[in-house]
Every structure is written in structure tokens, then in C-alpha cells.
Amino acid sequence: MSLLIEVVAGMSKKPYISPSFSYIPLEETLQITPKKKRLFIGIPKETSFQENRIALTPEAVSVLVNEGHDVAVEHCAGDGSFYFDNDYSEAGARIVYEKADVYKATTIIKSAPISDEEAGLLQPNQVVISPIHMPMLKAGILEQMIAKKIIAIAFESIKDDAGTYPIVRSMSEIAGNYAILTAARYLANTDNGKGVLLGGISGVPPARVLIIGAGVVGEFAARAAFGLGADVMIFDNSIYRLMRLQNNIGRRCFTSVLEPVTLAEELMNADVAVGALKPINGVTPLVVSEQMVQNMKAGSVIIDVSMDRGGCFETSRLTSHEKPTFKKYDVIHYCVPNIASAVSRTASRAISNVLMPIMLQCADMGGMEDLILGKAGIRRGVYMYKGCVTNAPIAKRFNFKYTDLDLLLASHNDM
């Protein structure tokens, strides 16, 4: 009873309203969903760099077409990977017989760098997604792309949400495995090698494989070499990478920092040397001098996987899949820059698995400009944006003006 009286007494008090109190309604802020954009994607046939890969498989094209996008594939573009025109037409793509018609697309996706001929076919304000081969890059191509205000993305520089480079990792796994298989081939007499079996047999010691670089290429090269029974030595300047590699492959092996005296001594006894160093500022450091190569055993094999960024052996020079090797100081050099193209179907599927989801994201976010703005991993791959060079190593090499992409995007937003 007393409780009820207290409540009634409390209700009889007049409410106090502060002068600062306001009854003005506030606007509710709602997130505006970007309008989905319909993409027009062109996939040209690669005619340079001995390229057999194709950037989107028929399965990926089918997904894009079912989402309402237009995909034009040049006649015979997928033949090198045993994906034929019939496969693409059944997936919903349009088969185009003139290269110029493919380049009418707003987005061009390639598995090889832009060539001189293709640079002339580019349309103003196009988006180009392709790799970069630094040794083969030409100022004239870049000048045409600058004049046409191209948005150019190097797909090997794209990062995923986990902070890794998915295409580079896939191609590195392929390159590491293939490097050892290639070395085994060139050690044999059938390819003018000295007739050494990489893994040895009972009573005969195995070949010695020296790997320079403990990244993904080095790890998978070591896995393949160990799997074939070879004796493996790994050099890298990062103790962390050396420890990680040993933990990943699950066994102890010879490891060392890149100290010139030790490296030179081990190269003298190596049957195979694999160059798998990561580039620094876009260029692979030279760590093996010509004198070191000259002191290697006659008939030994060098596989310079780093050739697409300059190579890490002083005696290396670009070779092709048609003529992949040369000899210097009786040492066989294999210096093909796009090793993954030798197993093009596997490589094509790996690239397509990364690029197809990116294209779907691009459409969902309203276009490539919005995707670049919203995804830091995609921004990492942009080396040219609407007439500005946004990659510092490229700008420095060709004496172009460098523009920071983040500042460029910020200034555009302010406008």
C-alpha cells in the first residue's frame, strides 16, 4: 500500500524539461548500394611472348555471362590451353574474328603483356588487366597508354583479403615444381645433358640442387627436388623465410644466408641451380656473378625463374619456349620468363579462379574505378590510372612522372 502511494506521489511531480532539449527530427543516414554495372569484357588471342595461357576459362565465362555480362573471345584464343571456340560459345561468349573488334570492349583481360600492335588498338579510358614483364616493357607502349588514359592493372601485383598475391602464388607453385622437372630433363643425355639422374639410385649419390630464394617458388622447388630424391641446399637472406620453408616441407635441410663465399663454394659442387629470388622495387637482385657461373661444373643446369624481373644470374639472358636454353661456360641456362605457360591449362585455371571473382566484384561495386577505390588489394596492382603512372619502379625506369595513386584518388573524390 505504501509503495502505491509513493508511485502516485511521484507521478504528481511536474516533469523538468531542459532548455537545451530539442524536438527537431534528425535525418536517418542510409547506406546507398551502388548500381550494378554490366561489363563488356574482351579476351584477345595472345600472339607474343610464346604465351599459351588464357585469362578466363569457359567455366568462368559461363558465370559472368549468367550474371548478365557480355564477353567477347577472339577466335582460337584458348587453343594453346586446349579450350576451343566451341567451349566458349557454349559458355555464352561471342566469338570474334577480328582483333580490333575484341578491343572495343571496355575491359580487356590478357594473360600476356600488352604488345606494340595491341597498344595501337587500345581505346580511350579502357581498363586493361594483364601481367608485366619488366625486361620487355617499352616506353612507347606506356606512352600510348598514358595518352589514352588507360586504367592498367598488373594482375601479378593484386593482393587478396589475406594480404597475399594469389596469382603470383599459383604461378610460383607451378614454376617451382616445373623448374625441377625441367632441370631433371636437361641433366639427361636426351637434351645434351651430362647424363645424371636427379635422384640417384642405390650406391650412386643423388644430384645436388641449389635453390636461391626461400619464397613460394623455392619451397615448391625444394618439395619437388626432395620428392625426386635430390640433395637440396637453400639460400636466402631472410632467416624467417628459411625457417618457414623448413617447417612447411617438414624436414631439415641445408640452409644459408646469401653470403658470397659460401654461395660460390656450393655452386662449384651443384648440379642444378634454381634462381627464385623475389624482386626488390620491381627488379631481381643479381647475386650470382659471371665468375661464379664460370666455376660451376660442366654440364650443370641453371633454371632462372626470376627472369621475368631481370634474373639473379649475371649470365642469364631471355630465352623462349621455342628455344629455351643456351650454354655459357658449358653450363646449360634455362631463362624462359613465363614458365607457367608450358603447363598452360593448369595455369589458365589458376588465373581464372582469381580474376573471375574480381570481375563480379567490379560489377557489383559499380565499375573498376569504384572497385579500385574500395579495395586496397586491387589498388596494389594499378600501375597506370587515367594518364598517370602510379608505379614508382616503372616511372623511374622510363623517366616518367610518378603519381601516388592514393593521392590521385583522394583528389578526384574532392572534385
Image: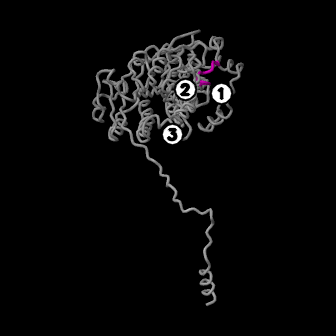
Q: Is residue 227 visible?
A: no
Q: Amino acid at mark 1?
A: Asp
User: Toward which corner of the image does residue 351 lie, by quadrant?
Assistant: top left
Label at residue 390:
2
Q: Earlier in the sequence, mark 3 or mark 2?
A: 3
Q: Circles 3 and 2: CB distance less than 8 Å?
A: no
Element at label 1? loop
Q: Is the residue 137 above or below the residue 403 in the image?
A: above
Q: Earlier in the sequence, mark 3 or mark 1?
A: 1
Image location (x, y in percent) of residue 157: 53, 30
Label at residue 236:
1
Q: Amino acid at mark 2?
A: Thr
Q: Nearer the viewer, mark 3 or mark 1?
A: 3
Q: CA distance from mark 1 to mark 2?
A: 30 Å
Q: Circles 3 and 1: CB distance less than 8 Å?
A: no
SS majority, magenta = loop
Write the residue at 63% across / 66% down: 18
- Residue under label 3: 374
Element at label 2? loop
Q: Amino acid at mark 3?
A: Gly
Q: Is residue 179 visible?
A: yes
Give the magenta range: 279-287
Q: CA distance from mark 3 to mark 1?
A: 36 Å
Image location (x, y in percent) of residue 176: 53, 28
